[in-house]
Image (cartoon, grey):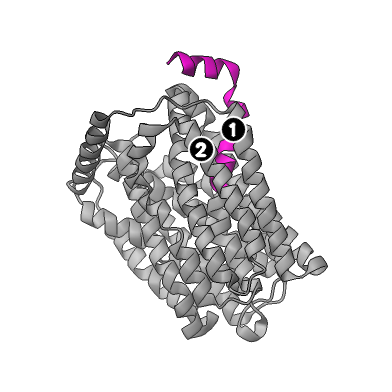
Amino acid sequence: MKQFSSDLKKVSPIAWVPTLYFAMGMPFVVLNMVCALMYKGMGVCDSEIALWTSLIMFPWTLKPLWSPFLEMYRTKKFFVVVTQVLSGVMFSIVAFALGLSSFFAVTIGMLAVVALSGATHDIAADGVYMSSLSTDEQARWIGWQGAFYNIAKIVATGGLVYLAGTFIDMFGVVKAWMIIMLIIGLLMIALGCYHFFILPSGGEKSDNAADFREQMHELWSVFAEFFRKKHIVYYICFIILYRFAEGFVMKIVPLFLKSSRAEQGLGLTEQEIGLCYGTFGAAAFVLGSILAGYYIAHRGLQKSLFSLALVFNLPFVAYTLLAIFQPESLFVIGSGIVLEYFGYGFGFVGLTLFMMQQIAPGRHQMSHYAFASGIMNLGVMLPGMLSGFVSDALGYKNFFIFVLICTIPALLITWFVPFTYPDKS
């Protein structure tokens, strides 16, 4: 504890909270969205892109399983620094592997290592945050945490994608993406080096055998208690289906925007995609999240949940119209992207609060929220894996009509979802 106190006296949270959560967001967004555009530009088919870029996200679903081990051998800071540097090294190797004839298989394997490293980083980073800050400080810095996680999303999907388009015009597709991956790699290594000197330790290791047995027993009891919760089967179905349609479109929308009009796409350049995602889309996401908070505070979650689900699924109507009419106006296309981000920001708040207020409460609130989040990620990952095959079979136009049909189960289960706990005033 004395070490904690000395760490905190030396370094203000402003020096490490923003950079820590920027580093948390970067690998997740790059693997989830940026790599899809990279592979599309390099000629990989939609089904392969959607399958493998979804499958490598699996560690973010399973990460609660190995979280107890991280406290037994080293400090949380150690795992933060190591995973940041490891992710940076792997991104750098990916950059050079893009020039290989078998680049797709090789780079997917490397990105899978990045995913495992990134998921482990999330556990350790949250551990540093919770261990190093008091309850009041956690509340004070939570806004910075969320803001810089989303800034990483803006930098990746906006700035880096835009920069990739500029480099493509100058150097060609392969060299352009090699430069982008190298930039990401060097950025992650730099953050790891910075945090080696700045980050608080996050606590001492716990390395005796009794702790290991106790951790495993505790983990099992936490799992058992989670599945004994009231309405838990319905709740699991709810958190899977709420984002079911989104799981299908998440990988396909960037590919749809990039594909040529002859392929039923919209034929946008990387610069145009980066501009729409990184500026107007990001602003719409923040606006939607803020408005949803006020909306729920005014009406209560139980009365608001269905309307939140409606807004969450509204963007799929916009993308269906874009696929049918294939407008050439960047303003019209950008409006669809803005609607997507606004709907995501507005509707996702409802699911997050539901998991916090209806699923997580109990003796193991943090762990049960982590389990619910893992199930939610699984619900997005599975349709994402299938989305490319469905898109290839149906074409973009019929694919988005199919997605509209997939919203029906989500809306039905939301309408009838039971509440275990009443809304808090």
Q: Say which residue appears at 46% left-offset and 61% top-offset.
A: 56
- Rendered view: 109 above or below 101: above
Q: Which contiguous range is marked in magenta?
A: 1-25
Q: Main secondary structure of the magenta part?
A: helix
> In this rendering, would 272 be left or right of 31?
right
In this rendered view, identify the residue nearer to me: 71 or 238.
Answer: 71
Identify the amino acid type marked 2: Val
> In the structure shown, which secondary structural element does the residue marked by tag 1 occupy?
helix
Q: Is residue 354 left or right of residue 32?
A: left
Label of residue 80 in the image: 2
Identify the residue at horizontal 22%, vertical 51% (top origin). 232
Q: How many marks?
A: 2
Asked if marks 1 and 2 touch (Cβ < 8 Å), the reply is yes
Mark 1 is surrounded, within 10 Å at the Cα level, by few (under 14), some (14 to 19) or many (20 or more) other residues, namely: many
Confirm whether residue 157 shows in the render. Answer: yes
State the residue in front, 155 or 139.
Answer: 155
Q: Report the residue at 55% width, 66% height from top.
A: 106
Residue 345 drawn at (x, y percent): 52, 52
Quarter of the rendering occupied by the C terminus: top left
Seen at 53% across and 59% down, the residue is 110
> Front-most of 308 and 344?
344
Residue 176 position in % (x across, y down): 73, 64
Residue, disc 1: 195
Q: Secondary structure at mark 2?
A: helix
Residue 14 drawn in magenta: yes
